[in-house]
């Protein structure tokens, strides 16, 4: 592995006039942020619905706890599909360009999410509704598996070296923005409708709105230019007499970067789904109104958008590794207080709990996009970054809601958050070790770096 420190913009950008470079960079960052927002609105809306709606709509033949666990199982199907989506979209993104794959992934996500809003309930079609739900969730997983890598790379590869963490963080800032929009939509439907109306048809409205967001997203994505770093690498590859290597084989031939980014990012996603699924169920089971919990989480998610970007910028100065390690330590230390605050019926205490937790998560999540993407060379960066990120989501989040619900329930019929805390602390320790085993990447030259 070789690295070349750089303090100037990538060579592919250096030939452009300064104003043109800034314009292209801003446009790529905005596109990555808005596109990621739309895709994560769709993906994380499902997370909120799996905690509050799907057990009562698609798993009516099970008791409440078993129904919740079954709904989380369909939630996991999307995470299982994400690495496959990352491999497929990453391959073509490294071969034919980032932009085309971003538009295609958004189209698939929008159609799948809209269709979820049309799935018949168990009362109408029995278990077939759950089967259809799983199929559409897999489509969501494939789409978001291809979305993240392309969006992160477009922002990263359009930016100057000393601003990459800041630029790439906007891709991850789309996740809490999308979560806030989705939760606001679901919470509003829950608040203005009766319980019967909400479970009958009201929950479908936020999913059907995905079609409107799809149109907006495709228009935005179509106006962004291709990554200049990719174009420079493509031109260099075409000038070589040798056949181009398969990106996936390049990544797997030296798997250390893939393994470390996967393990390094895993706990971040475990903590993310703790906040978006388990903590919502935990608070509502404690007697707090569902709409109050959803609104508190949504408002805190809005605040966290700014934290994500801020800590991405901080990582440009202090490095990706130290910021991420400190974040994990602080989050685990906060868990006991967090669970206690979730049982308080004061809305502002609830809001504070989610705000602090999401701020600490943002400290990890802000630098993550740059941290993962910078570990791979240009010719396999889309594939490597997508696989690293999506495998991290799979092992960190795919089955975590089910595991947390099962640990919380306990073997004797009682409930306790202590096993939940121990599990999350262990997961975080693994990530800390993996992060410390990587080399600091904030000064890598994206043009010359080879993984």
Image: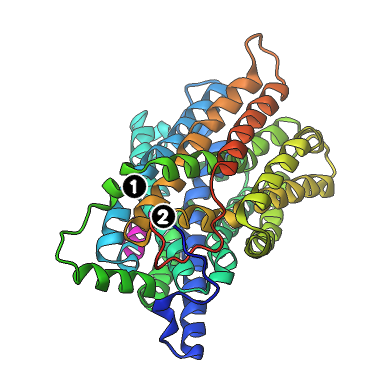
* Place of residue 83 in the rendered image (x, y in percent of width and height, measured from the top left): 37, 43
The question of residue 108 being in magenta is answered with yes
- Side of 79 relative to 180 (left or right): left
Upstream in the sequence, badge 2 or badge 1?
Answer: 1
Q: Magenta segment, which residues?
A: 102-111
**Which label number is shown at residue 376?**
2
Give the image location of residue 149, x and y in percent: 42, 57
The residue pinned by badge 1 equals 251
Q: Residue at x 63, y 64 (%)?
A: 316
The question of residue 71 being in magenta is answered with no
Q: Position of residue 10 (x, y in %)?
A: 45, 74
Q: Tell me if I can see residue 77 in this picture.
A: yes
One can see residue 185 in this view: no
**Is the C-beta separation of discs 2 and 1 under 8 Å?**
yes
> What residue is shown at x 83% (from left), y 39% (from top)?
345
| Foreground residue among 187 and 317 | 317
Q: Which SS type dominates the magenta stretch?
A: helix
Crowd tier of the residue under label 1, counting other residues whose Cα lies within 10 Å: few below 14, some 14–19, many 20 or above: many
State the SS at label 1: helix
Where disc 2 sits, the SS reads loop
């Amino acid at each position: 592995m070789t690295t070349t420190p750089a303090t100037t913009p990538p060579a592919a950008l250096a030939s452009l006039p300064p104003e043109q470079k800034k314009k292209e960079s801003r446009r790529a960052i905005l596109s990555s942020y808005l596109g990621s927002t739309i895709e994560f609105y769709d993906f994380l809306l499902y997370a909120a619905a799996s905690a509050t709606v799907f057990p009562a709509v698609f798993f009516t033949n099970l008791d409440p706890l078993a129904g919740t666990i079954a709904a989380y199982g369909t939630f996991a199907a999307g995470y299982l599909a994400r690495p496959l989506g990352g491999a497929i979209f990453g391959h073509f993104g490294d071969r034919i360009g980032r932009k085309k794959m971003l538009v295609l992934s958004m189209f698939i996500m929008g159609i799948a999410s809209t269709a979820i809003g049309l799935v018949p309930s168990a009362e109408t079609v029995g278990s077939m509704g759950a089967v259809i739900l799983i199929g559409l969730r897999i489509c969501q997983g494939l789409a978001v598996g291809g979305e993240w890598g392309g969006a992160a790379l477009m922002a990263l590869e359009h930016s100057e070296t000393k601003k990459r963490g800041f630029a790439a963080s906007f891709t991850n800032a789309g996740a809490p923005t999308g979560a806030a929009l989705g939760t606001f939509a679901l919470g509003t439907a829950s608040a203005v409708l009766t319980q019967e109306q909400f479970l009958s048809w009201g929950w479908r409205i936020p999913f059907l709105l995905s079609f409107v967001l799809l149109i907006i997203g495709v228009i935005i994505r179509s106006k962004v230019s291709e990554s200049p770093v990719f174009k420079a690498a493509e031109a260099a590859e075409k000038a070589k007499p040798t056949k181009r290597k398969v990106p996936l084989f390049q990544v797997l031939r030296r798997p250390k970067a893939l393994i470390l980014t996967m393990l390094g990012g895993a706990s971040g996603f475990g903590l993310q789904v703790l906040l978006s699924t388990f903590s919502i169920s935990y608070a509502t089971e404690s007697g707090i109104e569902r709409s109050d919990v959803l609104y508190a989480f949504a408002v805190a998610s809005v605040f966290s958008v700014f934290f994500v970007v801020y800590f991405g910028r901080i990582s440009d100065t202090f490095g990706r590794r130290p910021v991420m390690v400190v974040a994990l330590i602080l989050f685990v230390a906060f868990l006991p207080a967090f669970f206690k605050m979730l049982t308080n019926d004061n809305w502002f205490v609830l809001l504070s709990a989610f705000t602090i937790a999401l701020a600490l998560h943002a400290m990890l999540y802000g630098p993550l996009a740059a941290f993962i993407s910078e570990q791979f060379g240009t010719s396999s960066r889309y594939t490597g970054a997508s696989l690293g990120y999506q495998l991290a989501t799979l092992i960190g989040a795919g089955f975590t809601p089910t595991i947390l619900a099962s640990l919380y329930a306990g073997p004797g019929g009682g409930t306790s958050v202590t096993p939940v805390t121990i599990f999350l602390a262990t997961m975080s320790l693994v990530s800390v070790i993996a992060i410390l085993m990587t080399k600091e990447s904030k000064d890598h030259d994206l043009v010359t770096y080879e993984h």
